[in-house]
Amino acid sequence: MAGQLAETIPACLVEAHARARHAHEQVRTRTQEAYGHGLHAAQYETLAAGLTPIHEATSRRLQGRTVMIVGSNAILPILYAKKDVPVTEARLRKAYGLRADLIRRHGPKPMQLALDLDMEEFDEEHVHPDVALLPPELQLIIVAYACSMEQGVMRIEWGSAGLLHGDRYLIWHHHEPLLPPANPRAA
């Protein structure tokens, strides 16, 4: 199944880019708003269409988007850069919200223990309501990709990453490329 996912996910993200670029060209604006908003929506839609035929694939609506679950793994796409930079530079736009809560709750456990200053623990009861409905055993697979309207999809990696409370930078525990550097870039 991993091989099928490794083939399907990049094809879906390349299609999402093509759809977003087409939307931008149809709108004919000077800004890239149509492209950016289109890519955000299309990444979920193309992944849903591409992954639905896979055995054990189901979907869940989270904050108006369809997130695919394959077995006990949720697939979360994240556009992390508009240029070809390492995935280790990936960060979220905001430190709070659906994506951050998904990563903190369903990502890997922190690699290092929190500093214990013998103070009361901060209570993390305020989790996004959609995330609270997911089963606790669900594991998160982050599909981080670099993509721009001009260059297309330049880099795609998947793996597991954590996120410290209040921080936006992903802490990768494991990641590997889904789009080999030798392949021609999608445009």
Image (spheres, rainbow, N blue to C red):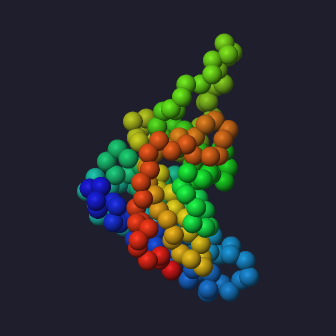
Residue located 46% across and 73% down the image:
14
Residue 141 shows in this picture: yes
Quarter of the figure with the N terminus:
bottom left
Question: In the rendered image, which quarter is residue 35 located in?
Answer: bottom right
Residue located 42% across and 66% down the image:
179
Question: In the rendered image, which quarter is residue 112 located in?
Answer: top right
Residue located 34% across and 52% down the image:
70
Residue located 56% across and 83% down the image:
22
Q: Position of residue 171 (x, y in %)?
A: 55, 43
Q: Position of residue 40 (x, y in %)?
A: 57, 65
Q: Residue furthest right?
A: 30
Q: Which residue lies furthest to the top in this view?
A: 118
Q: How many labels does the image show?
A: 0
Q: Position of residue 75 (x, y in %)?
A: 43, 53
Q: Where is residue 21 in the image (x, y as percent from the top left)?
A: 57, 80
Image height of 121 relative to 107, above or below: above
In depth, the one of 132 and 84 nearer the eye is 84
Image height of 44 relative to 33, above or below: above
Residue 131 shows in this picture: no
